[in-house]
Amino acid sequence: MRKLSYAVVSFAVAGLLAGPGCGSSPTDPHADDDSGIGTEGDGGPINHFGVTDGGGSDGGGGLLDASCATATAAASRQPVYMLIVLDGSGSMGQQNKWNAVVPALDSIFDDIQKSNDPSFGIGLIAFSDQNDPTGGGGPYPSNKDVSIAFVDATQAAALHKRIDKENPSAGTPTNKALTGAYSELEAFTPSGLLQPNGKKVLVLMTDGVPTDSTTKQDVTLVAGELAKTGPAGPITTFVVGVGNFPSNNTGNFDPSFLGQVAVAGGAAPAGCNPTENKNLASVCYFEVDPAASASVAALTKSFVDAINTIRGQLASCTFTLDRPDGGAIDPSKVNVVFTNGAGMNVVVGQDMGNGWTYDNPADPRSVTLHGMSCDTVKADPKGKVSINIGCPTVMGPGVH
């Protein structure tokens, strides 16, 4: 059952990329595997160049010989600073919308806390719920809202407190909430454990039509934030729309409003129709349809899927090399390893089409993943990339 406006990317780790094989040894169980990412494992734990595999002997000492390893370098993503703007207007209390979105966000907050990721900060503005001290009149953020920060136990508790045990209440002052949220993002400077030089992102989650503005006013506001240069911007805006699709009452739930805002915010997929109200596959925002969900649990999952897909799309495929001890790196003895959310380690071959390349082969400072390798890493918000040093570089999209 499709409820998101564009597909949640999901790829199998093995058999991922098309391409010619690179010649494996007779004892290599992946000898006929022509994927661009080589998988490990069908037995006891082994260690390849400093990375412990979740399972397996490959029958020939591993895809790479562990004895050649000298170090493992961290590979850092570009940080993301996300501010969620949540509609708490009275209509969100209908059709189990609020009962689903709150546990969904709680799940996301807990997941981010567990990841202990200093490259991802999150904050929350909720408007018009019973905990909104302005009663829906603004300005925002209110003194109850949560500023962006690294999600440790304290931040996670603050995020939970803002929406737990609350209920939807008043009107839909979307423009006031967006205006205040953009001001906060423009002025935001990371501190503490949160890494610098990140992307600024706003996620609007709403079921209704603004009561304090027109579509044109909001589109102009959103587009202006995307056009701003650093350090204030640019700010990318994603939209999660919550309502029955197609909408029979655009005065209450207007897909055209949501689509136009998503396009103005730079987050819409190529080829989408910003005024679509018939074909779900063509809408420009993330659609969560209460009528399409058989239970609160299913509706909650739709919200979780939407936020996780956004997280995946924000993930950069360029990773900075944190050199061990600040020393030089031999470009011919570097391998990129992706550890997916299930803990499986896979080796990514060096390849311009469906692998990875250096920024500068003579003096590498970063690596960039391409093609389906990039898509796979972005689709797994719990995945991690590491750079392993000392073993000859695995070349090409095939498994060695």
Image: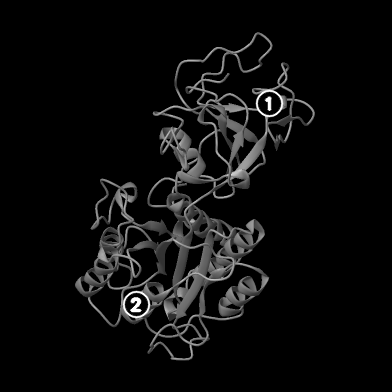
The image quarter in which residue 317 lies: top left
Residue that label 1 marks: 68
Compared across the picture, whether 76 is left or right of 111 comes to: left
- Amino acid type, mark 2: Thr
The disc at residue 174 is 2
Residue 189, position as x, y percentages in the image? 45, 72
**Residue 10 against residue 160 in the figure, above or below:** above
Tell me the residue at 56%/20% (across/down): 399
Compared across the picture, whether 274 is left or right of 202 comes to: left
The mark lying in front, picked from 2 and 1, is 1
Counting residues from the start of the chain, the first of labels 2 and 1 encountered is: 1
The image quarter in which residue 208 lies: bottom left
Q: Residues within 10 Å of mark 2 (few under 14, many from 20)?
A: many
Tell me the residue at 41%/34% (across/down): 371
Compared across the picture, whether 62 is left or right of 179 comes to: right
* Residue 9 in sight: yes
**Residue 350 against residue 121 in the figure, above or below:** above
The C terminus sits in image quarter: top right
Residue 78, position as x, y percentages in the image? 47, 54
Compared across the picture, whether 205 is left or right of 64 comes to: left
